[in-house]
Image: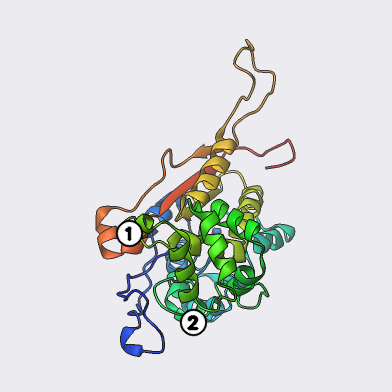
């Protein structure tokens, strides 16, 4: 989750009762902002692409570094982000541009235009502004309609998915996108309880679909299910798989790619992609000399993922699961796919 100030909330709080609504933070706190800026090393006059504008916390730091002769292109599929971008752009110390699109589609557009930015960065997952907008249904902590769309203009919502997908497909999604151990039981309860209309309905189905012993400890029992449904509704992993190679191909030599992820499904993809770019010879070890001729395209700037320090986690608990990885482009791929 793209983090911001932690909010205080009561489990199961209903928006119908304002006294039980969670505290809504007003100040956006971007995760790992100094670390991201250091790894990207922005210079005056450069061009940067922010793939997930959100609240603009990272964008402000990059804009200040690239200055009046620089350009910052921001992408976000959430229509609410465009209003925040307009406020940001009015005061930004550099040239700006906004694309209202999924970041994979936005990057394809920019690549088609021939843009060659010195840096591309991604702050993956949902933003805190989305979580804190109770009516959008991203959180299991209070009652709301089953929506979970990052782009409120798209047709498929969480309610559509939960009420229309067959049980086998639901179970597969819970396993694949939530790594949910009890996916089969939860899927059966979802189907049995249809139609589900609110987040409270989904939480009840999850609790009924898992063993009683699994309802306590290890966090909220619906956490993995909500993650899985959100990822499925928004096609998040497909977008990441599409966006990483597109972003890499756009970079010139010396360009930098960075991504902040918030769960293992995202982090594994970023790690594997960057590691593949940094790998040289792939010949079998029994060959005495290299015959593949493969040279590394990347230099890893993070041998291990960068995580928030104790001070940041204390100030912003939502940052706890963040992992930052980055790489420097040192060669162009000559074999077609990047």
User: Could you tell me which residue is drawn at 37 percent across and 69 percent down?
Assistant: 4
**Mark 2, residue position:** 135
Residue 93, position as x, y percentages in the image: 47, 72
State how many labels appear: 2
Confirm or deny contact between disc 1 and disc 2 (CB under 8 A): no
Q: Nearer the viewer, mark 1 or mark 2?
A: 1
User: Relative to 279, does residue 176 appear above or below in the rendering?
Assistant: below
**Mark 1, residue position:** 216
For residue 72, the mark is none
User: Could you tell me which residue is drawn at 72 percent across and 42 percent down?
Assistant: 337
Residue 13, position as x, y percentages in the image: 36, 80
Mark 1 falls on what kind of element?
A: loop
Does the rendering let one see residue 338? Answer: yes
The C terminus, quarter of image = top right
Within 10 Å of the Cα at label 1, are there few (<14), some (14-19), or many (20+) other Cα atoms? few
The N terminus, quarter of image = bottom left
Between 247 and 207, the residue placed more toward the observer is 207
Residue 111: name its quadrant.
bottom right
Mark 1 to mark 2 CA distance (whole Å): 27 Å
User: Could you tell me which residue is drawn at 61 percent across and 50 percent down?
Assistant: 244
Residue 170: name its quadrant.
bottom right
Residue 157, position as x, y percentages in the image: 61, 73
Does the rendering let one see residue 55? Answer: no
């Amino acid at each position: 989750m793209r983090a911001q100030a932690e909010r205080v909330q009561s489990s199961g709080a209903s928006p119908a009762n304002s006294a039980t609504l969670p505290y809504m933070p007003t100040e956006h706190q971007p995760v790992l902002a100094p670390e991201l800026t250091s790894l990207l090393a922005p210079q005056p006059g450069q061009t940067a692409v922010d793939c997930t504008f959100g609240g603009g916390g990272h964008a402000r730091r990059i804009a200040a570094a690239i200055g009046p002769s620089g350009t910052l292109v921001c992408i976000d599929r959430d229509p609410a982000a465009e209003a925040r971008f307009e406020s940001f752009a009015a005061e930004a110390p550099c040239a700006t541009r906004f694309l209202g699109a999924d970041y994979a589609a936005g990057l394809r557009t920019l690549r088609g235009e021939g843009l060659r930015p010195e840096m591309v960065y991604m702050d993956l997952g949902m933003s805190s502004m989305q979580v804190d907008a109770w009516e959008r249904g991203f959180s299991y902590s209070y009652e709301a309609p089953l929506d979970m769309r990052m782009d409120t203009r798209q047709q498929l919502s969480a309610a559509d998915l939960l009420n229309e997908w067959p049980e086998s497909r639901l179970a597969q999604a819970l396993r694949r996108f939530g790594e949910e151990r009890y996916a089969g039981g939860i899927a059966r309860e979802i189907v049995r309880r249809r139609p589900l209309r609110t987040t409270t309905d989904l939480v009840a189905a999850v609790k009924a679909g898992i063993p009683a012993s699994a309802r306590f400890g290890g966090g909220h029992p619906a956490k993995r299910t909500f993650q899985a449904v959100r990822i499925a509704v928004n096609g998040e992993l497909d977008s990441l798989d599409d966006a990483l190679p597109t972003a890499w191909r756009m970079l010139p030599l010396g360009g930098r790619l960075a991504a902040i992820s918030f769960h293992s499904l995202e982090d594994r993809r970023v790690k594997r992609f960057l590691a593949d770019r940094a790998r040289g010879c792939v010949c079998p070890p029994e060959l005495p000399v290299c015959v593949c001729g493969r040279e590394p395209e990347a230099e890893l700037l993070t041998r291990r993922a960068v995580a928030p320090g104790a001070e940041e986690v204390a100030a912003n608990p939502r940052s706890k699961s963040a992992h930052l990885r980055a790489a420097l482009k040192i060669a162009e791929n000559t074999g077609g796919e990047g």
